[in-house]
Every structure is written in structure tokens, then in C-alpha cells.
Image: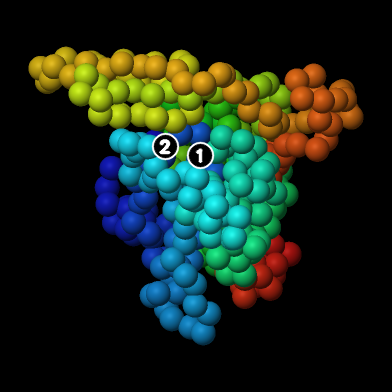
């Protein structure tokens, strides 16, 4: 399956898919380890667009973007200090800033489903009171049925799973014990023969994969491994900034290699320089703090926090909706 090349509404119609309506225009592609915020921003945009289309008494403000500098890295130092001052008064410029300011993420990754719901609610922020959310428990057996029931109500679902980055299976679910954990928004489903397929928003585009593959991948998110990130900066000989964000060394180097190959193919004389700024940072968040119950209650060796105090992706998906729709969502989930 993989990436959908057709125009999304045409694809949904041709596939006879049950999907959200309207389908929002894709956001710019994801920057840095921030997939949870991009998936959430797309869902909030959907609810805003839906109200704009259908009208009603409940007015939603335009949602915050997933991160402040959405279109690309800053070319010159920005207004970080001023934004931090405004955040203290509840005025945020992005979902990521809210998450970082309220200690729901370290660098931008969200390894706790409950934390993603807290960002959606935005307590004490300028968008507080508009949206609510719920962490929904799922199993490999009931995953597909739960997702389909929510989509019948045109409610998208934010799903954590291990993602493939291989060319032949890009975006599709795999099993990596949580070491490739990723968030996407499932916006529709359709059937081919005896198989159900999900349509999902990911990396600024739309993809499709078997719905049961998501169920299997979600159910095996058990890694406790620390993922090491550092702040990287890629510039050219003229000082233009191509990349400035947290990342993992292997993936950033691979990205720079691809850019250089593209420059060589077109005869572009641009020279890229990769620098690492600051010390390496680990991500102190877990997918499964108990390792199957065998190390229940142990203190973490790196920061001495209780393992039970962090983590939570396995057998969970996130539903975010307008606050006044909470009763209807509860009814769908009780079926």
C-alpha cells in the first residue's frame, strides 16, 4: 500500500471509504521528533474546518500549529525569550510550546497518550475549553472495530505504532518493540476483499495500510530503550540554514547524504555542513515502564524516577473532539 498518489477526496470516493468530512489541507511536512503534535494539529484543524462548513452555536478558534516555526528552520535567532514570557500568561504559539512549557514533552516527542490529551485540552491556555479528549483502550482483537465505529461518526483517531521508513513500506506499521514509535491520524477506512484498510495522515501526506497491521504494531509497543537525540544544524557555504532541530545522528546524516546526492545529480554546487550543537540529550520517556511486569516499580537508573510514573502507548489510541460532543463520543465507545 503506502503513500496515496491520487487526490485524497478522489481516492476516498473511488475506494468507497468511510471518512471524515471535510478533509483538511495537509500541513507542511513534519519537522523534528514532533509527530504527536502534527497528528493532533491535523485533528484539531479538522474539527475547526467542520464547524466552518456546517455552522452551529459552538465557535472554535483557529487551532495552534504543531510547532512555532512550521515552514522551516529560523535563519536568524528568534524571539524565544518573548514567547516564553507570553506562555507564562497562557498565550502559546504552538502545541509543541504548550507541551514543553507544561512538561508534557522534553524535545517534542510524546510517549504518553494521556499527555497528548492534556495538550488537546490546553488547560489555562488561550484555547482552553474548546476541545476534550480521551485515551481509548484497545487490543489486537477489538482495535479495528473501535476505529471503524469512531470513523462511522466521522471522528478521526490518533494512533501510536511502530512506523517503517523503508522505501518499499514507507509509513506502514511494523514491529520494532517501540523503538520506531510514531503517531498518525487515521481519517478513514475502506474494504478490499476480506481486508480492512486505514487511510491516515502522515508526514504532510496521506497513506494507506491494513487496519489490522496497526492493531498488531500498537499491541507490541514495549520498548524501554532510551533514544539519544542531539541538536543538529545544517548550513550551506552562504550561511543558509537547511535544518536546525533535535534528531538522531543516523537519521540526520542520512538526510544530509540524500540532499548532497540530489545536488550532485542536478549539478548544484551547494556545499552542506553538519554541526552538532549542545550536549546529547536522552528522551526520558517510556512506552512500557514495566517490561511486561518483570521490573515493576524499579527506579530509573538515569534520573531516579519511578518507572511507573512515565510512559503509556501500548494498547491505547487517542480520540480528540469538540467539548460539546463528549456525550456522543462516549455513546460510540460504549457500543
> Where does the image place residue 214, in percent across and percent down from the top left?
57, 39
Q: Are marks 1 and 2 in contact (CB under 8 Å)?
A: yes
**Above-or-below relation of 114 to 252:** below
Q: Secondary structure at mark 1?
A: loop
Graded by Cα atoms within 10 Å as few (under 14), some (14 to 19) or many (20 or more), the crowding at tag 1 reads many
Graded by Cα atoms within 10 Å as few (under 14), some (14 to 19) or many (20 or more), the crowding at tag 2 reads many
Q: Is residue 15 left or right of residue 317?
A: left
* Figure disc tally: 2
> Where does the image place residue 255, in percent across and percent down from the top left?
35, 21
- The residue nearer to you, when weighing 197 against 175, is 175
- The residue nearer to you, when weighing 320 against 274, is 274
Where does label 2 land, which residue? 31
**Above-or-below relation of 4 to 294:** below
**Above-or-below relation of 267 to 130:** above
Image quarter (top left, top right, bottom left or bottom right) of the C terminus: bottom right
Kindly identify the residue that appears in the image at 63 percent across and 23 percent down.
282
Amino acid at each position: 500500500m503506502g503513500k496515496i498518489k491520487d487526490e485524497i477526496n478522489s481516492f476516498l470516493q473511488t475506494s468507497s471509504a468511510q471518512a471524515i468530512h471535510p478533509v483538511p489541507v495537509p500541513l507542511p511536512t513534519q519537522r523534528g521528533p514532533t509527530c504527536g503534535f502534527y497528528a493532533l494539529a491535523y485533528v484539531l484543524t479538522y474539527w475547526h474546518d467542520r464547524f466552518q462548513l456546517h455552522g452551529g452555536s459552538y465557535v472554535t478558534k483557529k487551532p495552534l500549529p504543531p510547532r512555532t516555526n512550521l515552514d522551516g528552520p529560523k535563519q536568524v535567532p528568534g524571539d524565544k525569550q518573548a514567547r516564553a514570557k507570553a506562555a507564562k500568561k497562557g498565550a502559546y504559539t504552538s502545541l509543541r510550546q504548550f507541551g514543553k512549557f507544561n512538561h508534557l514533552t522534553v524535545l517534542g516527542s510524546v510517549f504518553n497518550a494521556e499527555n497528548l490529551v492534556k495538550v488537546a485540552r490546553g488547560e489555562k491556555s488561550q484555547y482552553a475549553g474548546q476541545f476534550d479528549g480521551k485515551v481509548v483502550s484497545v487490543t489486537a482483537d477489538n482495535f479495528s472495530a473501535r476505529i471503524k465505529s469512531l470513523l462511522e461518526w466521522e471522528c478521526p483517531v490518533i494512533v501510536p505504532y511502530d512506523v517503517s521508513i523503508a522505501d518499499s513500506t514507507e509509513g506502514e506499521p511494523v514491529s520494532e518493540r517501540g523503538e520506531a514509535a510514531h503517531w498518525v491520524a487515521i481519517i478513514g477506512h475502506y474494504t478490499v476483499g476480506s481486508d480492512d484498510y486505514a487511510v491516515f495522515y502522515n508526514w504532510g501526506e496521506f497513506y494507506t495500510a491494513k487496519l489490522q497491521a496497526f492493531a498488531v504494531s500498537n499491541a507490541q509497543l514495549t520498548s524501554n530503550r532510551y533514544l539519544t537525540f542531539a541538536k543538529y544544524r545544517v548550513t550551506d557555504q552562504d550561511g543558509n540554514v537547511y535544518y536546525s532541530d533535535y534528531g538522531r545522528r543516523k537519521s540526520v546524516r542520512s538526510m544530509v547524504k540524500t540532499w548532497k546526492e540530489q545536488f550532485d545529480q542536478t549539478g548544484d554546487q551547494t556545499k552542506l555542513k553538519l554541526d552538532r550543537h549542545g550536549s546529547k540529550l536522552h528522551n526520558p520517556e517510556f512506552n512500557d515502564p514495566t517490561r511486561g511486569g518483570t521490573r515493576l516499580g524499579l527506579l530509573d537508573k538515569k534520573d531516579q524516577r519511578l518507572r511507573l510514573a512515565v510512559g503509556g502507548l501500548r494498547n491505547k489510541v487517542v480520540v480528540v473532539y469538540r467539548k460539546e460532543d463528549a456525550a456522543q463520543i462516549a455513546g460510540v465507545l460504549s457500543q
